[in-house]
Image (tube, grey):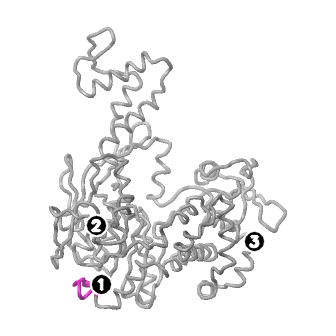
Amino acid sequence: MKKKLNYTLPLLLALVVAFGMFVGARFTRSTGSMSDGDPESLFQEVLMLVNREYVDQPNSKKLTQAAIEGMLKELDPHSAFIPAEEVKRSNEDLEGNFEGIGIEFNILNDTIIVVTPISGGPSEQLGIHAGDRIVQIDGKKVAGVGFKNENVFKSLRGKKGSEVVVTIYRPGNPKWTDYKITRDKIPIYSVDASYMAEPGVGYIKVGRFAGTTMREFREGFEKLQQQGMQNLIVDLRGNPGGYLQTAIEFAQQFLPNGKLIVYTQGRAKEKQVYESKEYSPFKGKVAVLIDEGSASASEIVSGAMQDWDRALIIGRRSFGKGLVQEPYQLSDGSMLRLTIARYYTPSGRCIQKSYKNGVEDYYEDFSRRIKSGELESKDSIKVIDSLKFYTKINKRLVYGGGGIVPDIFVPLDTSENSSYLNKLYNKGTFNEFVISYMDKHRTELTSTYKDFDAFDKQFDINKDLMDQFIKYGEKDGVKKDEKGLAVSSPFIKSQLKALFARHLFKNDNYFQIINQTNKTYQKALDVFKDNTFDKMKIASK
C-alpha cells in the first residue's frame, strides 16, 4: 500500500559510500579495515575494498542498486527501490495518466497494430483506427525490425506538446499515410466497467485504487442511478491495491459518518485512525467480489465492509497484504517505497500473510492454495484460531492473518484451469487471433452487428471459428489438446466473444460477456433475489 506522499530523504548511506566518500571511518590496518565492526562500518569496509582492489573497474551505481535491493529483500516483500529512469512509469497507473499519442497497441508478426485509439486522445482525433499498422515512426522503419514493447513506449510516449510523425498502413489501402501527432496527457482508467447487470442491480469493476478512481467511480455510479440502480455489485477481483486515501474515500461511499474504516500503526509511526466522513452514503444492498488477486487497498475496502456487516463478501480468500508503503524521493531521482506500518480493519484484524520464509516463498502462496484444495473448497482454507475477531454489528466470526475470507465462498471455475488454456494465454494467442480475425472481417462484423445488444444475442463462437482459433494456436506452438479443450472450451468461447465485444464496442461490453458465465458474478446476482442478506443480517444503510 502506498501513501500519496512525496518526501525527500538524504541519499542512503550505500549511495554515498559507493562513490568513495567515506565520512568518519577509522582505519587500524594497512588493508583499510574499520575498527568498529558494526554493520554499517562492515558494509563500508567491503565496498571500499571492492572499489580499491577489485580486478576490474566496478560499476558503483550498479553495485549500490544491488546492495539496496538485497537489503530491502531482507525486510518484507513490498519494500522496493525504484531506479530514477523507472519512477515515472511506475507511477503512471496510480496517477491516472501518461503523456503520449493515445493508443492501445499489440505487436503481431513483428508489426505494431493499433488495438484501439484511446477515446478523446490525439490519435483518435486525427482519425487513426483500430487495426491500423504503424510502419514508421519519424521516418524510421519499425515494422519487421524486431521492435519490442519498450521500444514502442520510448518512441511514442513523450512530453505533452511534443510532436511525432507516425506512418500508418491501413489494410485495404495500398497508400501509407503520415500523421503528425501532438502528444498529450492520456488518461489511464482505473474503473474498468460500469453497467446494469439486471433491472435494479448495478455493476462496477474497479481495477485499482488510483488518483482518478473516485471521479471515475462517481461518474459510473451516477449513470447507474439514473438507470434505476437500487443495489450494487462492486467487483474487486484482481485489484492489486493502490492509494490508501483512495481506499478510504471509496469505503466511505457506503458507510455512515464516523465509522472506523482502517487504522495504521508502525514502529516509528503513531497510530493513525481513518473514519468515514461521507454525509450521504449509498443505502442499497452491496455485494463485494474478491479473489486471490485482491490485495492491499481492495482488502481495506472489503474488510471494512465486512466488519461493519455492510456488504456480502463473495468469492475466494484475498491475497493477504496488510502492509503500508510510503514513497521517499531520493536525491538522484530514484525512489524508495518503504513499509512503514501495518493496517488493521475495524474489528482489529491485520490480514498480512506471513513472509518469514522469504520473498520467493511468499509469492508461491497461490501454488500452495491450488495444491491444498483451497480454491475448490472453503473448508480447505487454513485459518488461525488465535486470530479470531468479530464483526462490529452482528458479531460474526472473522479471522486475521492472511487475507479476507469471504462470507460466501465460490470455487475457482475448473474451465479456467488447464495447462492448454495457460499455454494459449502465455503465447498471447487470444488477443492475436482476435486482432487477426478483425483485420479480415471488420467491415462484415460492423455492418452485421450495429450495436452491442445485437452482437450479444446473435454472435456465437461456432465450430468453424473455434477450429480457426485452435489452428492459430498451433501456429503459435500450442498443440491441440483434446483433454484441455474438454475442460476449458466454455471459458475459451466466452473469452473470445468478450474480446470481440471489446474490439467492436467498448470495455464495459467485454465484462458484460465474460460475466455471463462467471460463477462468482452469478452468485452475486442470486443473493439479491433470495433471503441471504436477511439471513446473514447484512443490512442496507
Q: Name the residue under label 2.
A: 381
- Of labels 2 and 1, earlier in sequence is 1
Secondary structure beneath dot 2 equals loop
Amino acid type at circle 3 is Lys
Amino acid type at circle 1 is Lys
Q: In this view, does 447 lie to the left or right of 377?
A: right
Q: Which of 106 and 341 is in front in this view?
A: 106
* Image position of 9 with respect to 53: above or below: below
Q: Which of 279 and 107 is in front in this view?
A: 107
Q: Which residue is drawn at 37% across and 65% down?
A: 292
Q: Mark 3 points at which residue?
A: 440
For disc 2, the neighbor class at 10 Å (few under 14, some 14 to 19, many from 20) is: some
Say which quarter of the image contains residue 365: bottom left
Do labels 2 and 3 touch, CB within 8 Å? Answer: no
User: Which of label 2 and label 3 is nearer to you?
Assistant: 2
Q: What stretch is highlighted in magenta?
A: 532-541
Image coords of residue 294 (percent x, y)? 37, 65
Image coords of residue 400 (percent x, y)? 22, 63
Which mark is on residue 283?
Answer: 1
For disc 1, the neighbor class at 10 Å (few under 14, some 14 to 19, many from 20) is: some
Q: Does the magenta stretch include residue 533?
A: yes
Q: In this view, does 441 lie to the left or right of 62?
A: right
Q: Is residue 436 left or right of residue 23?
A: right
Q: Which residue, as the protein is rendered here, is positioned at the far top?
A: 30
Q: Which residue, as the protein is rendered here, is positioned at the far right?
A: 174
